[in-house]
Amino acid sequence: MDKKAELDRLRHEIITKNVCPELAAQATNLVMGDGNVNADMVFIGEAPGKKEDESGLPFVGAAGKFLNTMLTQAGLERADVYITNIVKYRPPKNRDPSAKEKEAFLPFLLQQLSIIQPKVVITLGRHSMEYFLPDVKIGEVHGQPQRIKVGGVEFIIVPLYHPAAALYNGSLRQILIDDFLYIPKIIDKKT
């Protein structure tokens, strides 16, 4: 089975198993992910927002536009990477995903990573970082590659601030851009 077919099967499984039924009931779309299924990099956000829920694609609102700009600055295109979220349905009123919701989607996220097999996983914001680095503060580790093992699979994780945080807090903007521009060097060291 090819990777796209495996990801489609995983999408169907989430719907069939009715993961987080209270979120699913109020969502327009399941937002599984988007991009190159053979990507060296997977970006993981926290949960879809309003625009993402409407389109069924991750990172298409203001934070997504900023993410696209940073990809371009790093010499990449959105089509070069794969983008997903921890939680695959939009929480009501764009609230943060709950610990229970994140836990419910963890097995599916790990399966996505297992299917895609990226060289580097970039977490966007503390919610996705906490999945892999539970007892650290993003301000202390942002931009620093971490080798970890989850579910028997080894990953290089690079925690970054969420693009939305940089939109609301101008002082984080340059920090995020600088961290982002370092990512291709991390990939080069890994290969």
Image (cartoon, helix red, strand yellow):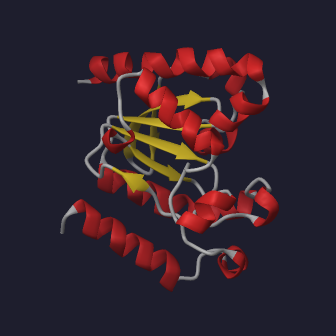
Q: Name the residue nearer the viewer: 165 or 61.
A: 61
Q: Can residue 143 be seen in this view?
A: no
Q: Which residue appears farthest toward the left when viewing the image?
A: 1
Q: Which quarter of the image is occupied by the C terminus?
A: top left
Q: Which quarter of the image is occupied by the N terminus?
A: bottom left
Q: In which quarter of the image is residue 175?
A: top right
Q: Which residue is drawn at 63% across and 49% down?
A: 46
Q: In this view, does 67 lie above or below 12?
A: above
Q: Which residue is drawn at 59% across and 59% down?
A: 52
Residue 129 horizontal side relative to residue 74, left or right: right
Q: In this view, does 121 lie above or below 142?
A: below
Q: In which quarter of the image is residue 184?
A: top left
Q: Quadrant of residue 7?
A: bottom left
Q: Residue at x 58, y 54 (%)?
A: 86
Residue 141 horizontal/vertical position (percent)? 62, 21
Residue 85 horizontal/vertical position (percent)? 55, 53
Q: Name the residue nearer the viewer: 69 or 140.
A: 69
Q: Which residue appears farthest toward the bottom when viewing the image?
A: 16
Q: Residue at x 41, y 55 (%)?
A: 34
Q: Is residue 123 visible?
A: yes
Q: Name the residue nearer the viewer: 55 or 136.
A: 55
Residue 41 horizontal/vertical position (percent)? 37, 37
